[in-house]
Amino acid sequence: MDTKNSFYLGKIFDLSSRSVTEQILLYEPDDLTTHAVVVGMTGSGKTGLCIDLMEEAALNRLPALMIDPKGDITNALLHFPDLAPADFQPWVNPDEARREGKTIQQAAADTAEMWKKGLSDWGIGSDRIRELKNSVTFNIYTPGSDAGVPVSILASLKVPPIPWENNRELLREKISGTVTALLGLVGIQNIDPVRSREHILLANIFENAWSKGKDLDLGELILQTQKPPFPKLGIFDVNTFFPEKERFDLAMLLNNILAAPAFQTWIEGQPLDVQSLLYDEQGKPRHSIFYVAHLSDVERMFFITLLFSAVETWMRTQPGTGTLRSLLYFDEIFGYLPPLGNPPSKQPMLRMLKQARAFGVGLVLATQNPVDVDYKALSNAGSWFIGKLQTEQDKQRLLDGLQGAASGALDRAEYDRMLSNLGKRVFLLHNVHAKGPVLFQTRFAMNYLAGPLTRTQIPELLKLASTGPEFESTPAAGTQVGAAPIMQVNNVREEKPEEVGSATRPSLPSGIDEFFLPNNLTFTQAFKAAGRSMPGEAFSQGLLYRPSLLGQLSVRFLNRKYNLDSELMQTVLAPGSELRGLVRWENFQEEPVDSRSLDSEPDPRARFVPIEEPLADLKEMASLQKDLVDWAFRNVKATVRVNENLKLYTGPDVSAAEFRSMCAEAARKLRQEDLDKVESAFDKKLKALTDKLDREERELDEDETELSQRKMEEMGTHAENIFGLFGGRKSSRRISSSLSKRRMTAQAKADVDESKDVIKDLKAQIQALETEKAQALEEAANQWGEAANQVEEISVPALKKDVLVELFGVGWFPYHIVKVGEEIVELPGYGRVQS
């Protein structure tokens, strides 16, 4: 079925005859940039409509995040192209089969037959189901559980990848939502961010860390709650504002959730990295379902708030667009966007309803409770899908909200009449992008609508998608699951601090710079980095600095052809013992160091390991710097991703998956433009032929009328002649008139035959043109489908003048000296916390 990149949602419903017409309803996906609201009581077909929307999004290669609070949306994985009874059997409800007096096998066979017939009636075949199955990657995430892919919430405590200075308001809103959600998780409800001491303290801890580009984990948050990293809050010192004993009580509340065994699943698994939740490593779109039916109300609120905040932060890093880029579907918003009250989820949802349009992110928000939602917030939605409602109060409340949301006058009486006559699977569509409201019946869903599925069924569901925790679940960094150090730690040194180094800082010759890497790993992270589990008790015995060569180069790449203007940072950290003879710099490459994070002075508690000869020799260091620059010039190249057909070029700052996503979006846009051009060109020709056909059909009507009249006149003349013969009258004039009438009848018949031939020829031309149009549309669509995949990678070298030295000298790497029982161990103090 060719839907021309539109969503095929059903067919127009005629209210006067209360029947479905043959006119299909196509919905433009870009209309979802202004968001959609779906309302309907239980049994209205609301879930089926939402599944239809997600199916069409998948067929159009649009990624989506789906929040499933009841278990219905997991049905999005139940697509069976073969429509075989064996495919349906595991998902048939045995209790329902028993009530109907059927075996499971009989019920599965009947269900398969019903789906086959239902889809056939709506013009959908196995090929389209197979296309749905292969269009996107499906997955089910289960925060707080390992039934599906577990989700780590620790990434939500990391500093977002956007600059603090230019995004203070946004980041403070994110901090406020995160803190409110965290406090809700420990039982502190109805929080006023301006009056709550707990909120003010935790928000300031977050701001202190994030404004400096530092991440937090739960362990560090608990420690800083006890001992805040700032002396004052406002004009009061911390202890006056929030006494130490009461801070300890708050820290204990936070520690309780961290200590609970059940909470461990919250800090392991897939991070809330929105880009990887929307696209896989190859750039293929994902449909990621977040199953939260198993969570308590407090846990659900906590997670949904973090998810909306994560999406909001991600979208701020994306370029603006007028086309639909991705969808966020929430199956039941009751309690999360109320008209009164301010739960943690409300503010990020409000901001996204107002701002997501500019970034091509569409929200689809559904509810079966139209009374208790914030219609002022929902006035930002451009599309309303309204199904059968339960009570008159529901209908009147919804009409009030719809009237407030309408940009122009709304005929309330007409809407009331339509809403009062809705049946199952019949919806009213109010779309600000359309001329007026329409009624339609939803099409048959391609996915088997088995009803709400339980957590225990999720592992089997994931097998259908050939994915699961074993494929996706990765440990998340943070509390108990730690940090990846920049310098690889192969073992833990077990030397007493007085036996290692000196309290006196070694001196360096003038001309050799030195840098102090920050001591930024908590004990939890440091133990993990060293390959050890965090013990019950550990006591700091001080800090030890070890010297290495720290070099960091900025390699600039400029290329007009590929619109390339990028900078690659090359960082090396090499111990002095490795710097004699030929140095293989590639063996010492590390993640770039933020020069702003470097300490200007060493920690006053620290001891120092002596500096080895190459690091203290000015001539040797100058030679090593030249060698490093030469190595970077010869070996460092920028990878440019190119799609010549689409005229798209990106540098190394854009990942392969992101570039493929850009190509898909550009191809989709160009494809639509081409399809519109082809359609417009053919429609002009078709209109000319159709107009001509209309004229010929009118002429045929006139010719047939004239032929009928001529036949009657001819018959009248014949009758008159016969009566004349019986009367004895004979007239040559009468015979001549008869012949004349016959000639006129023959001419009229010839005109009719000619019109029929012309009409037949025009219909053949129209049919041929329709076929040609369909072929041209298919060719245009296929051309851009292939174009999106024609990506090549090109290596671009740098000029030597564009290799600049940012840092070069002795880098002092900090290590914790820690006492564990009777054992003294050395742990890395500097590292990078990974999500």
Image (tube, rainbow, N blue to C red):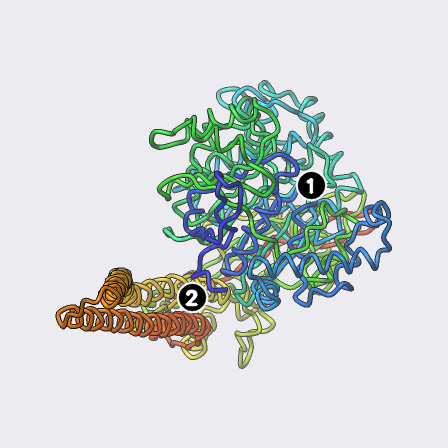
Q: Which residue is mark 2?
A: 663
Alpha carbon of mark 2 to alpha carbon of mark 1: how far?
A: 36 Å
Helix, strand or loop at mark 1? loop
In front: mark 2 or mark 1?
A: 1
Position of residue 264 relative to residue 618, above or below, is above
Name which of mark 2 and mark 1 comes first in the sequence: 1
Give the residue at x 42% y 50%: 360
Q: Which residue is mark 1?
A: 70
Position of residue 780 relative to residue 605, above or below, is below
Image position, residue 647 (x, y; %): 33, 70
Image position, residue 732 (x, y; %): 14, 72
In this view, the residue in front, 744 or 564, is 744
The amino acid marked with disc number 2 is Cys
Give the residue at x 72% y 60%: 112
- Neighbours of disc 2 within 10 Å: few (<14), some (14-19), many (20+): many
What residue occupies the far bottom of the structure in this picture? 582
The amino acid marked with disc number 1 is Lys
Image position, residue 743 (x, y; %): 20, 73
In this view, the residue in front, 685 or 139, is 685
In this view, the residue in front, 514 or 165, is 165
Q: Is residue 622 left or right of residue 366?
A: left
Image position, residue 291 (x, y; %): 68, 46
- The image's mark for residue 10 is none
